[in-house]
Every structure is written in C-alpha cells, then in structure tokens.
Image (cartoon, grey):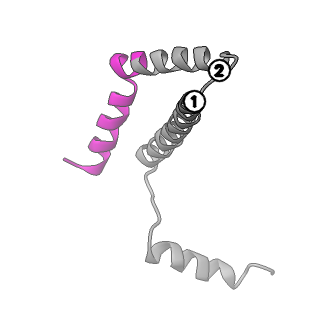
C-alpha cells in the first residue's frame, strides 16, 4: 500500500462517525469537569491530557492533509540543495 493511501485511510478513520462520536463524548466529559467547583488532581490531569490529545491530533491531521495534497515534498538533500542555492542570493 502506498504512503498516500495510508495517509488517506488514517484521515478517513479520524473523520469516521465512530471516532467523531468518541470525541464528542470526550468534549462532554471535559465540559462537566471544567465547571466542577473542587476538582481532584486526577480530574485536572484528565482535562489537561485530553486537551493535549485533541490539540496534537488536530496538528497531526493538518500535517497529514498537507502531506497528502503536496505533490512536491522536499526532503533531505533536495532541501539542502535549495537552501544552498538560495543562500548565495539571500542578501542581494
């Protein structure tokens, strides 16, 4: 299976109804824990960790979407070569 197909498959799973339903439940739990007057330490840890997971997953989804839609990915020596070519003309 090609890398692009793997990316598309993963993005489809993230956007599936079951995963979105799970995140909806997580958001509801977060809303309940955030309004609690005297949360215990584990509840505060849950809120913090859940927001980190949501943020990182959104960042990953964005990066994978850019990767999927990008025809020209510059990596390794190609990127270095471009930098070296442009470095000579940087201040001219």
Residue located 52% across and 78% down the image: 80
In this rendering, would 52 be left or right of 18? right
Crowding around mark 2 (Cα neighbors within 10 Å: few <14, some 14 to 19, many 20+) is some
Q: Residue furthest left?
A: 1
Foreground: 7 or 46? 46
Q: Kindly identify which numbered label has been placed on residue 47.
A: 1
In the rendered structure, the answer to whether residue 19 lies left or right of residue 66 reads left
Q: Quarter of the image containing the C terminus? A: bottom right
Question: Which label sits on residue 34?
Answer: 2
- Residue 72 % position (x, y): 45, 57
Q: Where is residue 7 in the image (x, y as percent from the top left)?
A: 34, 42
Is 2 above or below relative to 16?
below
Does the magenta run of residues contain 9? yes
The reply to whether the magenta stretch includes residue 42 is: no
Q: Residue 23 carries which label?
A: none
Coordinates of residue 84 in the picture (x, y in percent): 60, 82
SS for callout 1: helix
Front-lying residue, 47 or 4: 47
Query: Closer to the camera, 83 or 41?
Result: 41
Q: Write down the quadrant of residue 44 in the picture.
A: top right
Contact, mark 1 vs mark 2 (Cβ under 8 Å)? yes
Report the span colored magenta.
1-21
């Amino acid at each position: 299976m090609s890398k692009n197909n793997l990316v598309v498959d993963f993005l489809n799973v993230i956007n599936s109804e079951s995963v979105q339903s799970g995140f909806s439940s997580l958001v509801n739990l977060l809303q309940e824990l955030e309004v609690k007057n005297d949360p215990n330490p584990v509840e505060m840890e849950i809120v913090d960790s859940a927001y980190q997971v949501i943020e990182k997953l959104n960042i990953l989804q964005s990066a994978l979407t850019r990767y999927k839609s990008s025809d020209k990915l510059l990596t390794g020596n190609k990127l270095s070569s471009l930098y070296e070519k442009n470095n000579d003309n940087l201040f001219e």
